[in-house]
Amino acid sequence: MSTEIHGTVAPGYEAVRDAFASNWDLHEEAGASVCATVNGEVVFDLWGGTATYDDGDAPWNEDTIINVWSTTKTMSFLCCLLLADRGDLDLDAPVATYWPEFAAGGKEEIATRHIMGHTSGLSGWDEPLHMTDFLDHDKLVGLLAEQTPWWEPGSASGYHAISQGYLLGEIVKRVSGRSLGTLFADEIAGPLGADFHIGTAAAHDSRIAHVIPPATMLGVDGPEVDESSIAYRTLMNPMMDASFSSTPAWRRAEIPAAGGHGNARSVAMIHTLTANGGRANGHQIISSDTLERIFETQAEGTDLVLPVELKIGMGFGLPSPALPLPNPHTCYWGGWGGSLAIIDMDAKLSFSYVMNKMNETTTGDPRGAAPLHATYAALMS
């Protein structure tokens, strides 16, 4: 074993540690963590490798956290489901019910569920943007409120890579009077004791690993790129620079689709509630009936932004022929570069993989897949 692996493994799950360790030999992993709970109990919590900081490499430690990109979206979904559970937010009602300015541009009938399901037609911005604009929530939600949808809302999904978080963040703010990051900290992460942050305070900087950006920028490639396409307009305005996530300004900002900081333990702990009928760490956070809404299909078919077939429920991805999962009552999402959250309600499994070295992917990564396969093998043995 070329890399020392730290942490704990319950009897029967030893193969997960081996699969995790193999990532350094097979995939040149840098630093990473993997964790899972079953029936609310941790069955493995592992970490290893190096974290990258301003002053060079240091060991990836038990409390190392990092920007997890779109795995953050799953936390935003929980915030909306929580408000729906309390009767404060109707996911089927027009967004303009809570945010009147949003009705402009023919968006009177777009509901929160359309945004959660990536079908609202607002996968990006008409106005040219720079990465620094992601720090200005009010500017970005104002532009989206004025904008006309790029396709008929509800007719198809088009991955709302960054815009989804600002849209949901403004809805949460209008409904609850709190920012999404604050609501998440107060009502979900805090009660669960989960070390996950949407808007990360300076006190955590010393243990935040920097991402190692992928070899190529996120974008639309090919010899004949159609700059008028929805995919191009979504992914190239602005062109994403992963290194910007290591700046203090990005960390402090609440970017609910891409800016969350945590590790596999914190992601797995949060989704322990999703896997167990809304209950974790002795707290009933959301009702099981509301969590069932995750499986209400919002879109199914080839995505207009990502070059894959997707089945999308109320925010989360769902099993489909293009992405089969062992149990039907499973939902998931992942982040640019390879982070991953899998929640299997049948097995009461919450699984997460988080790392600092980003691969050139938004749709799957073998580094998380191998420990996940080993987890299911252990569950089925």
Image: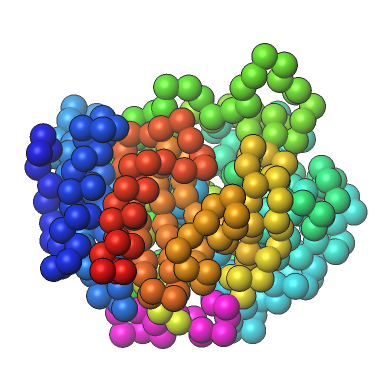
Name the residue at 48% across, 35% down: 361
Name the residue at 65% across, 47% down: 309
- Residue 73 seen in the figure: no
Name the residue at 31% across, 38% down: 356
Give the x, y percent position of residue 354: 33, 48
Q: Quadrant of residue 135?
A: top right
Q: Quadrant of the N terminus?
A: top left
Toward the viewer: 246 or 287? 287
User: Horizontal placement of 210 versus 49: left or right?
Assistant: right
**On screen, residue 327 above or below 258:** below
User: Horizontal placement of 143 versus 307: left or right?
Assistant: right
Toward the viewer: 15 or 104? 15
Name the residue at 63% across, 51% down: 310
Please identify the residue farthest to the right as the structure is shown.
Answer: 106
- Residue 39 seen in the figure: yes
Q: Quadrant of the C terminus?
A: bottom left
Give the x, y percent position of residue 124: 70, 40
User: Horizontal placement of 340 versus 101: left or right?
Assistant: left
Q: Quadrant of residue 55?
A: top left
Toward the viewer: 100 or 155? 155
Range of residues picked out in magenta: 278-292
Give the x, y percent position of residue 302: 70, 45
